[in-house]
Image: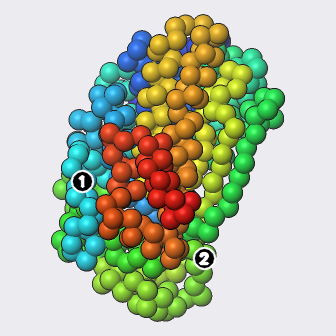
Amino acid sequence: MSNHPQDGLSGQQDATGGIAIVGGGPAGLVAAIALARRGIPTTVLERDAHPDLAPRFNPDRSYTIDITGHGLRALRDVDATGYFDDRLLPFRGIQYEDRIVEDWPEPGWTGSRGDILRALMAVITDRHTDAVHIEFGCRVSDVDVATGAVSFTPPGSEPTTRRFDLVVGADGAGSVVRQAMQQQVAGFTVTRKSLPNYLTMIALDRLSDQLDETYLQALATRPFCIAGAIPGDEESDGPRWFCAIGTRRQLSFSSATEARRYLRHNCPRVLDLASEASVAAFAGRTCYHIGQKLTCSRLDGGRAVLLGDAAGPFPPVGQGVNAAMEAATELGRCIGESGPGVPALARAASSYHDAWKPELDAVSWISEKMLFENRLHTLRANLTMRLGHNVIGQAKSSHVPYSQVRAEARRWGPLWL
């Protein structure tokens, strides 16, 4: 099968066995590449259109994603760094009031989720079309965890069911695979927690060369305003800038005038960089609750295993995509070392749980200590940074596991507990 935008799953519906990856986001595509590099074919079932046909970003929700340490490790593992060099902007750190507050020493990139998907699809198209079979525009409706049967509807076709040796749930926070595991796997539990974290986006469309696009730009701390650039639509275009405004309460404005008043009082620099039209769009934009935290008792069960937000979404600390991609390479390693067959894949899924669950729990724990507009969290972060312990900086490192970052933070006793 070819992975060009118009192609689907050619000749795969009647086959049985193999590995299905439900979800073709960053985690799912990295997992497919990691397995392809080990000679293991996969079938990816993705509900959205091919990234080359889909919008690169959603102006209501698209914040700039920085790919750093743990994501860098994953991309090195699947030999994809050159594709990110070609398609995303280089990332060099964080600036605040034109002063560098974090100088990033390793390779890194910034871009939209669409940019990341396009780069990963280019890897598949160039190198792995014989091993990665992707069905775009495909909705998965049901998963039988015990048998590995996946029911889905390909675009323009009738619903079908196919059995797989292993089903990888990489289908996001509302995961169908996770729901099936919760319903069908004895002892599998999901704990949910709602935290006061909200995010509203505003486009900085008056910005030309005032800010350095190779840095994330902190424009305010209360509310948390972080601006970042993504590549322009064409090579000749300059970068596009977005500012994520993070608050502990849901923002709502009755008019553009009220929104402008809020920005002038809380983050005036945004007004210097956003047009009247952009402020008006901000006034009517949805303020999303991004404080949902979810913890699974296990990451595997039956013939299923979970990746990324399907395994456990957490409030943003710049590690969601990075952690998801690293988890995908960890799963690829475990499967590659297990050998073929259902029992071997079950052992691989269990090994992946043992290796990755402590890391996922650790980065989720870290995220809960860094909520927007929380004075205690800000004070704690500033104090420990002055004492030489930068939790977020360490969490970004490609050399330090998340579990080690949490263990070191907890040594500070009540300050971090």
Q: Is residue 313 left or right of residue 40?
A: right
Residue 205 occupies which quadrant of the picture? Answer: bottom left
Residue 363 percent location from the top left of the image? 50, 48
Residue 377 percent location from the top left of the image? 49, 69
Q: Is residue 33 above or below residue 137?
A: above
Residue 350 percent location from the top left of the image? 61, 22
Residue 124 occupies which quadrant of the picture? Answer: top left
Give the quadrant of the C terminus.
bottom right
Residue 249 percent location from the top left of the image? 60, 76
Badge 1: residue crowd in 10 Å (few <14, some 14–19, many ≥20): some
| Residue type at the position of mark 1 | Trp
In front: 315, or 384? 384
Of the numbered discs in the image, which one, if any, rests on residue 104?
Answer: 1
Label 2 sits on a secondary structure element that is: loop
The colour scheme is rainbow
In front: 289, or 283? 289
Residue beneath the point at 52% across and 46% down: 362
Label 1 sits on a secondary structure element that is: loop
Of the numbered discs in the image, which one, if any, rests on residue 89?
Answer: none
Residue beneath the point at 27% across and 36% down: 81
Q: Is residue 369 above or below residue 56?
A: below
Residue 402 occupies which quadrant of the picture? Answer: top left
Q: Which residue is mark 2?
A: 249
Foreground mark, 1 or 2, reads 1
In front: 126, or 229? 229
| Residue type at the position of mark 2 | Arg
Q: Which of the two discs, 1 and 2, labels the residue nearer the N terminus?
A: 1
